[in-house]
Amino acid sequence: MAEMASNNALRVHRLLPGEYGGGYKLESTIVPGVLGNAIFKLHCREHGLPEVLDIKRLSRPNPNWNEVWTLYLCGKRATARVAYYPRGGDVTDMTITSIAYTK
């Protein structure tokens, strides 16, 4: 996605793949949270950049919703379940659970 920044400069935002339902403003909070939790939980010590491969929405926002994220880290695929709980305005609480390498 692209938007106009100051001085008519173009600012580009990389969007998450798949069925991510949080909108680009929430991405700056959720991406480090999901990747950080997965790296910690799975004891990933690789220094390469982890990657979000796909996101599948498990429920439609009403107002809460759930997603399963597929990640690539430490040379393996992993999944994490993310639940969102909007509180109004720009505030959304999130829980990240069920983090595991896929078989």
Image: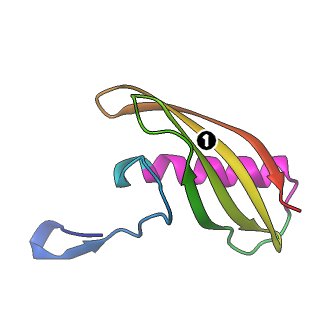
Q: Up-down: is 30 above or below 17?
A: above
Q: Nearer the viewer, residue 42 or 62?
A: 62
Q: Which image quarter holds the C terminus?
A: bottom right
x, y percent for residue 27? 45, 53
Q: Is residue 86 above or below residue 35?
A: above
**SS at mark 1?**
strand
Q: Is residue 94 left or right of residue 91?
A: right
Q: What residue is shown at x 36% (from left), y 55% (from top)?
A: 24
Q: Is residue 8 left or right of residue 19?
A: left
Image location (x, y in percent) of residue 98: 77, 41
Toward which corner of the image does residue 76 lie, by quadrant? bottom right
Who's the residue at 73% across and 54% down the image? 79
Image point 77% across, 59% down: which residue? 78
Residue 29: image x %, image y %? 49, 46
**Is 13 located above or below residue 98 in the figure?**
below
* Residue 75: percent from left, percent from top: 83, 74
Q: Magenta stretch: give its range.
A: 27-44
Q: Is 95 placed left or right of 72 in the picture?
A: left
Prevailing secondary structure of the magenta residues: helix
Number of numbered discs on residues: 1
Q: Is residue 42 magenta?
A: yes
In which quadrant will I find the N terminus?
A: bottom left
Q: Coloring scheme of the render?
A: rainbow
Where residue 71 sits, quadrant-wise, is bottom right
Residue at 44% of width from left, 39% of height from top? 60
Q: Is residue 90 magenta?
A: no
Disc 1 residue crowd, few under 14, some 14–19, many 20+, Cα 10 Å: many
Callout 1 amino acid = Val
Residue on which disc 1 sits: 82
